[in-house]
Amino acid sequence: MNKERIVYFLIIGLLLFFFLGRKNKKNHSKDTNIISVDSSLVVKIIPEKSNSFKIEKPREVNKVVYKDNNEQYVRLIRELEIRNNQKADSLMILRELLKAIQLREYKEIVKDSFLSAKINVKTKGTLESIDFSYKVFPQETKYYEKVIKIKPRYSILGGASIITSDIINKTSIELNTGFQTKTGNILELGINSNKGIRIGYKWNLFTKY
């Protein structure tokens, strides 16, 4: 087979391919590139988490100094006299001072569906320490994960064939290549050991995903 014949077949094949490709594109102009959209429920468990903090001798932000002639000092003495229903003396004041500087401890637990927190506060006239700990309960979160399959733009194929014939008592080996479009149609070009050329076009009749 001469070179002119090979070129002739190639030109016919390319024209056929582009003509049929354009026609098929018009027939599927409403199609999208999306093959399928799948969604699946995903359940994730956020594990439990806990931590604790302790502050010793926290820094005093606003320090109040009482003086003999201070209005706040006078008001405190008056409140002490009203509470005890008698005039304040040095023994009563000393008793109140000792009561104020004794060690006190306060505990509180805060809890809801999300976490549990414990607060432990110690005072001794002033704030001694704050102990805070918490535990976040394990949480379950659910969402739908979407998977979109998109058609490939094109595929290049390659392969080989062995051809036998009862008419021609000779086996030939063919090497071929193919070009597959987005719609699934395939243009094939092949050449065999008997110096034959094959040009073919395959339509995608049915596809199931």
Image (spheres, rainbow, N blue to C red):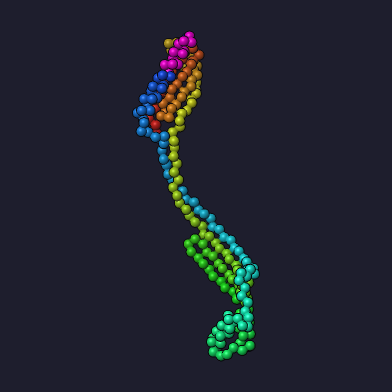
For the C terminus, the image quarter is: top left
Residue 152 placement (x, y as % from top left) = 45, 32
Residue 94 placement (x, y as % from top left) = 63, 85
Determine whether 107 is above or below 51 in the image. Answer: below
- Camera-side residue of 204 and 7: 7
**Quarter of the figure with residue 55:** bottom right
Residue 197 placement (x, y as % from top left) = 46, 15
Task: Give me the residue at 46% from left, 19% from top.
Answer: 189
Would residue 1 appear left or right of 52 to someone viewing this image?
A: left
Task: Give me the residue at 39% from left, 31% from top.
Answer: 207
Would residue 134 be visible to someone looking at this image?
yes
Task: Give me the residue at 41% from left, 40% from top.
Answer: 37
Determine whether 3 is above or below 23 in the image. Answer: above
Find the residue positioned furthest to the top: 2
Residue 129 placement (x, y as % from top left) = 62, 70
Would residue 165 be visible to someone looking at this image?
no
Find the residue positioned furthest to the bottom: 86
Determine whether 42 is above or below 21 in the image. Answer: below
**Quarter of the figure with residue 81:** bottom right
Instruction: Count all numbered tags in the image, as a single digit.
Output: 0
Find the residue positioned furthest to the left: 27
12 drawn magenta:
yes
- Camera-side residue of 63 and 99: 63
Would residue 194 appear left or right of 22 to someone viewing this image?
A: right
- Camera-side residue of 154 and 174: 154
Would residue 176 appear left or right of 125 to someone viewing this image?
A: left
**Quarter of the figure with residue 85:** bottom right
The span shown in magenta is 2-13
Determine whether 21 is above or below 47 in the image. Answer: above
Q: Is the magenta stretch mostly helix, strand or loop?
A: helix
